[in-house]
Image (cartoon, rainbow, N blue to C red):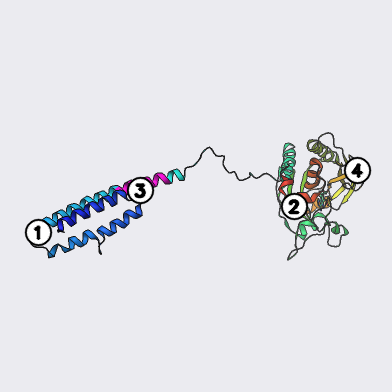
Amino acid sequence: MSIFDELTRLKDEVTSEIRGASTLEVLEETKIRVFGRKGGALTTILRGLGSLSAEERPEVGRQANEIKEFLEGLLAERQAELRGEALEGRMLEERIDVTLPGCWPPPGRIHLINQVIRQIKDIFRGLGFGVIRGPEVETDFYNFEALNIPADHPSREMWDSFFLREGLLLRTHTSPVQVRVMEASEPPVRIIVPGKCYRRDAVDATHFWEFHQVEGLLVDEGVTFADLKGTLEVFARALFGKRRRARFNPSYFPFTEPSAEVMVDCFLCEGAGCRMCKNSGWIEIMGCGMVHPRVLSRVGYDTERYTGYAFGMGVERIAMLSRGIDDIRLLFEGDDRFLRQF
Ligand code: FA5
């Protein structure tokens, strides 16, 4: 076979091979077999030009180059075609159905305790109180001493805590913030303090070792117990509605004089007496009283001129009473089946 026949045969063969290639991989193999630098069919022919006679060489060279250009063009064309097909296929495969419903992460919700704190804040803001926070890790001084509870005072037992290093402890109530606020400002003072408290209490249906309180403090000229009672009655009515009854019981706190406890009638037994209210028919929601003059004078307030009232309410108890929850532990378990009801 003459070299010209060989070239024509190669051209025909490779042309049909390129046209028939069904994938980019097959095309790449053909390319290597024809144009490959080592052993490519056309490369070998072009390299062999040197051994041809001087008459044959230019014509063979011309034809071989023509075929090379032709085949290269054909190859590029087929490559573009196959790439287009592959892209189309991928687009079909990866098509997004925009009509499918999306996957939403479940939206979070505000925990019932925080819902109740917000409700309490709203009521007191409406009565002109500001809202501030204080530290959960307290000193013995602010948690006890400054509240008229010296080291050997028996009432410390009611507020046993978790003690940390160097006289620090987890605060047992929000009352220490009263002192911090009065030290930092002059009367009139009118604030509430929501926050977490900790106690070494035995856990039962109404007690947990961590819980939340909202402290209230009002100091001004001419403040009386009647102001305290009126304010808390407005608060109880706004929060529980007219159906729940509230009452004041005389009580004792070293930092208030006189002192009282506010009780609300039990939602479970409607006052008849049950496990929840320890058969009393009432659930205690807060302690309150007139700020003890010793607490006022310790922060440098003129006790002849200023009087004040304070209260500290348990947020969990209020949540339980207003939403009909019969065990405080449910509020701390973090079970979404329970929490998503509120
Ligand atoms: C106090 O903590 C006083 N600081 C309240 C106070 C403030 C009195 C200002 C006078 C002036 P007491 O220990 O009673 O008081 O707690 C107040 C409220 O916190 C209780 O009525 C109750 O609702 C809630 N509480 C107390 N201990 C727990 C507990 N272990 N778990 C859940 N709630 C609790």
Residue 53: where, in percent of width, then height? 9, 62
Q: Which residue does the image show at 10% across and 57% down from the upper left?
A: 58
Badge 2 or badge 1: first in the primary sequence: 1
Q: Which residues are magenta?
A: 78-89
The residue that disc 4 covers is: 281
Q: Are marks 2 and 4 in contact (CB under 8 Å)?
A: no
Query: Which one is in front in this view, the residue at disc 3 or the one at disc 4?
Result: 3
Query: Which one is in front in this view, the residue at disc 2 or the one at disc 1?
Result: 1
The answer to whether 322 is drawn above or below residue 335 in the figure is above
Please tell me how crowded label 1 is: few (under 14), some (14-19), or many (20+) other residues with Cα within 10 Å.
few
Whether the residue under disc 3 has CB within 8 Å of ligand 1? no
Left or right, 186 with respect to 10, comes to right
Looking at the rendered structure, the kind of residue marked 1 is Glu
Badge 1 or badge 3: first in the primary sequence: 1
What is the C-alpha distance between the residues marked 2 and 1? 95 Å
Q: Are marks 2 and 1 in contact (CB under 8 Å)?
A: no
Whether the residue under disc 2 has CB within 8 Å of ligand 1? no
Q: Which residue does the image show at 77% across and 59% down from the upper left?
A: 141
What is the C-alpha distance between the residues marked 4 and 1? 121 Å
The rendered magenta stretch, by its main secondary structure, is classed as: helix
Q: Which residue does the image show at 46% across and 45% down from the upper left?
A: 93
What is the C-alpha distance between the residues marked 2 and 3? 58 Å
Looking at the rendered structure, the kind of residue marked 2 is Glu
254 or 112: nearer the viewer: 112
**Residue 248 makes an appearance in the image:** yes
The residue that disc 2 covers is: 333
What is the C-alpha distance between the residues marked 3 and 4? 82 Å
> Is residue 306 one of those drawn in magenta?
no
Residue 300: where, in percent of width, then height? 77, 52
Query: Which one is in front in this view, the residue at disc 2 or the one at disc 3?
Result: 3
